[in-house]
């Protein structure tokens, strides 16, 4: 799959088959996320790999969407404010650095025929409790990963380029 096809093919998958994702494939995806750039190369992120159905089902306390628990793997990307690069005005690069790693992984997953869906609209406190995530780490993104099931894909609505780009 070439680059243009890859970015057009990636979508937010909300229906997963029960087929397991092998450790080998998962390790490849995690390695490709590891290679993502980060501000000042701080890499202020880490990921929890959640496979156990009982643990995944506990996430209903944080994000109560039934489709979410059908993915065979949920990746919990965490960031650390302490380890993050801080701009002069105090802005943290943590969430951006996490997002870059997640984006690398989602594209790598798409290239291997896997589906993913970014979840940021969740309550992080139950996730921290369920996984025992220590300070200074904070859950930033939940990412279900699995082989896509049959679903009706909606056409993408994107703003025209002229609304997004200013040439000066």
Image (tube, helix red, strand yellow):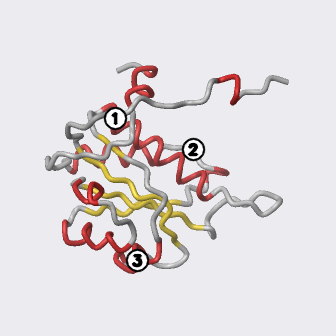
Q: Earlier in the sequence, mark 1 or mark 3?
A: 1
The percent coordinates of residue 73 (x first, y second) are 26, 56
The percent coordinates of residue 109 (x first, y second) are 33, 39
The percent coordinates of residue 116 (x first, y second) are 35, 45
Left or right: residue 61 versus residue 81 is: left
| Residue topped by disc 3 | 126
Q: Are marks 1 and 2 in contact (CB under 8 Å)?
A: no
How crowded is the residue under tag 1: few (<14 C-alpha within 10 Å), some, or many (20+)?
A: some
- The span from disc 1 to disc 2 (Cα, nearest Å) is 20 Å
- The span from disc 1 to disc 3 (Cα, nearest Å) is 29 Å
Left or right: residue 17 versus residue 111 is: left
Q: Are marks 1 and 3 in contact (CB under 8 Å)?
A: no
Left or right: residue 63 versus residue 100 is: left
- The span from disc 3 to disc 2 (Cα, nearest Å) is 29 Å
Tell which residue pokes out farthest to the left in this image: 19
As rendered, which of 152 and 144 lies closer to the eye?
Answer: 152
The percent coordinates of residue 167 (x first, y second) are 80, 23
Q: Which mark is residue 37?
A: 2
Q: Earlier in the sequence, mark 1 or mark 2?
A: 2
Picture residue at 40% right of the left edge, 41% below the top: 106
Circle nearer the viewer, 1 or 2: 1
Q: Is residue 4 above or below residue 139?
A: above
Picture residue at 16% right of the left edge, 50% below the top: 20
| Residue topped by disc 1 | 110
As rendered, which of 101 and 17 lies closer to the eye?
Answer: 17
Q: Are marks 3 and 2 in contact (CB under 8 Å)?
A: no
How crowded is the residue under tag 3: few (<14 C-alpha within 10 Å), some, or many (20+)?
A: some
Q: Earlier in the sequence, mark 3 or mark 2?
A: 2
């Amino acid at each position: 799959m070439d680059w243009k096809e890859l970015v057009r093919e990636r979508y937010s998958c909300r229906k997963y088959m029960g087929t397991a994702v092998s450790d080998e494939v998962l390790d490849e995806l995690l390695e490709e996320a590891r290679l993502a750039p980060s501000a000042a190369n701080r890499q202020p992120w880490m990921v929890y790999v959640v496979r156990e159905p009982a643990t995944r089902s506990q996430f209903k306390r944080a994000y109560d969407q039934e489709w979410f628990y059908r993915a065979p793997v949920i990746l919990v990307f965490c960031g650390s404010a302490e380890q993050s690069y801080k701009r002069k005005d105090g802005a943290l690069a943590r969430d951006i650095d996490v997002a870059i790693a997640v984006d690398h992984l989602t594209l790598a997953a798409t290239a291997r025929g896997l589906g993913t869906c970014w979840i940021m609209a969740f309550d992080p406190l139950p996730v921290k409790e369920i996984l025992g995530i220590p300070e200074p780490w904070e859950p930033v993104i939940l990412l279900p990963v699995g082989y896509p099931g049959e679903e009706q894909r909606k056409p993408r609505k994107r703003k025209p380029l002229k609304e997004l780009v200013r040439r000066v």
